[in-house]
Amino acid sequence: MASHNESIIREPLITGSDITYAKITTDVLRPVENAPTKAWWIGFSMAAVGACLWVFAVSWTFWFGVGSWGLNKTVGWAWDITGFVWWVGIGHAGTLISAILLLFRQKWRNSINRSAEAMTIFAVICAATYIVAHMGRPWMFVYSLPLPNQYGSLWVNFNSPLIWDVFAISTYFSVSLVFWYTGLLPDLATIRDRATGIRRRIYSVCSFGWTGSVKTWQRFETVSLILAGISTPLVLSVHTIVSMDFATSLEPGWHTTIFPPYFVAGAIFSGFAMVQTLLLVTRKVLGLENYITMFHIESMNKIILLTGSIVGVAYMTEFFIAYYSGGEYEQYTFLNRFIGPYWWAGCMMYGCNVLMTQLMWFKKVRTNIAISWVLSIVVNIGMWFERFVIIVTSLHRDYIPSSWAMFYPTWVDLSVFIGSIGVFFTCFLLFIRVFPSIAMAEVKLLVKSSSEQGKKKLLAEGHLDPSHAEFYKESLTKFDSVDLSEYEKV
Amino acid sequence: MSSTKFILGLFDDPDVMMEGISKLQKNSVPIYDVYTPMPIHGIEDKLGVKPSRLGYAAFMFGCLGGTTIFSLVYYFLVHDWPMDIGGKPAFAAPNFIPATFEWTVLFTAFGMTITFFFATHLFPGRAPRVMDFRATDDRFVIAIDAKGNIPHADITNLLMEAGAVEVKHNDRKYVSYE
């Protein structure tokens, strides 16, 4: 029941006084129901320019062929697959937050799941554009599907991880979309019932006639729980299969059994970093400090620290196994990451992903917004370099020294990459304009049990273990959205 | 003869609303439905709403998806066009697992969600049947069919006593039709 009081020693998930259900609606819908701010227009214009650059660069690729990229005979796979894996990895956090944290009953997910899921969908769209772009002739995409054809029928090879990937990515995208949109229905109904005129009509169509009756909510919760249950193994399977694109080859540096867990941890790591990057800005610009609190930021940082450390252990294991295998090609590949011509990429990878995230052991770092934001970007850069190192550095010196080569990106490579970031931000900025960026219905569930005002009432009533009360007040000092002076008297 | 079709008790607190439901039930007033801006746990038991059977549907769709793709892959790679890859058997079952898993999840998700939409009559463009516009915002609404539940004043009193912030006597069932 909603009246159940949570233990006082748990930190509040909603801060601020006089938070009512109506105030949550108003606060969350402010960017949706009002004209966009100047900051939004500036951000949107920049993102749209990036998206146009993407359209131009991809059109160029289709017109002149993949030869306009910097690929050569030795490095036949470079920025395209790097960008693809990077985006798919980023696209892992949303479903992780909404599915795994739901199964673990982590209530702090309620205020960040919506935007994280949206981010997932846009990141997977960006990843998918790389697949289509690197085909050069995008209409050939149809040959990756097992459809009857005039060659026999010649079917696709289900022994190949690339075909598994087609199934994994398309399933992941469509299931994430269903999960996200089903969750949006009650909130779209809220917008519909507050709007008038044409806006009401549009949101009426979008909200599928949602009413919020008892049976609807009951079924909605069943659907959410089961979707979370099936999305959890799904999200793990996606990056496992992406890693098998590499791990099932015979390429030194790729042919390792540690790849699946290592890639999954890396994906969660980069995804949470991207969520952190976006949320810290969103919370400030949209004034959502009371709903995305310091507790959320610190929890995210703890997960980044954990997954970053798992990635660090995986790196060390890779090196040890390369040494222990006794295979000289394997050993050379890993040594080459430090002493080869791409040593700087290796330094970026290990430095950004492992060394920098270790700073998050310090509470001062975890609870500092500026440092957290910078570190989240450092992680994103590091994770891009991780994929670059795995792909290009492993390929560029193959078995025959006469075919050794370097990879130099052309302006098309660069534009496709920068453009994909533009596409991502265009989608994200449009999303926060038209959809509620916080799951209102789910945050409303927390008002009575886990809000600061609810806990303040408990404190004022007394009947608490004084050491617990003291512990709780101590934990509030890190919050930037809590007025501590009110706690001196209680 | 009053023209009231539905009596709505509007509450601003879910716990007070739950007490309101108890009170109405104690006085044998049948409740038509309850509309809330968020899921309220325990309300189904109180109103005697049976547990959802969507889980069974999800399971069946999952079985269907897994079976479908496994049979297809078997047909493609073993029956229709077996390939000799280094003398290895065409029926390489472990390689069939990823696609089988993905379609199991895919069919479960889509099958269950479509069943949910179908059973709950949710689809794009459906006219919303809203009794009170604030039921999706900050009001917890108990709806009582006015027909047969007389006198209306008694029900109003019951709701007010239970802590309703407002009681509405609506002449139309739904206020959302233009």
Image (spheres, rainbow, N blue to C red):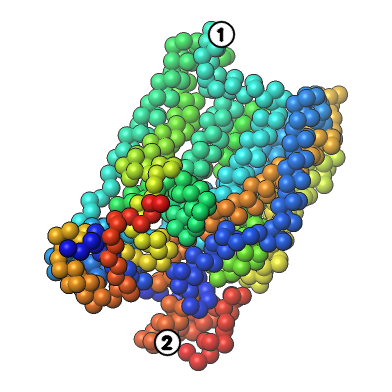
- Tell me which amino acid carries mark 1: Gln
Please give left or right for residue A400 compared with residue A142 in the image.
right
Q: Which residue is at the front of the view, A451 or A97? A: A451
**Residue at the spot 71% in from the left edge and 29% down from the top edge:** A134
> In terms of depth relative to the viewer, which is nearer, A16 or B24?
B24
Would you say the residues marked 1 and 2 are in contact, meaning their CB atoms lie under 8 Å apart? Answer: no
Q: Residue at x 77, y 40 (%)?
A: A53
Residue under the point 50% across and 78% down: A17
Residue located at (64% from left, 28% from top): A249
Number of marks in the image? 2
Q: Residue furthest front?
A: B1
Q: Chain of mark 1?
A: A
At which x and y percent is residue A347?
78, 49
Q: Position of residue B37 (x, y in %)?
A: 39, 61
How many angstroms separate mark 1 from mark 2 (CA)? 78 Å
Task: State which quadrant residue B101 falls in.
Answer: top left
Q: What is the residue that sits farthest to the bottom in this orientation? A: A489
Asked if residue A48 can be seen in this view, the reply is yes
Relative height, residue A65 to residue A205 (above, below): above
Question: Which secondary structure lies at badge 2?
Answer: helix
**In screen coordinates, is A33 left or right of A461?**
right
Identify the residue position indicated by label 1 in the image.
A150
Residue A12 seen in render: no
Front in this rendered view, residue A103 or A26: A26
Question: Would you say A222 lies left or right of A264 here?
Answer: left
| Sequence-wise first label, 1 or 2 | 1
Q: Amino acid at mark 2?
A: Ala
* Residue A159 locus on image (x, y percent): 54, 22
Q: Is residue A344 left or right of residue A115?
A: right
Element at label 1: loop
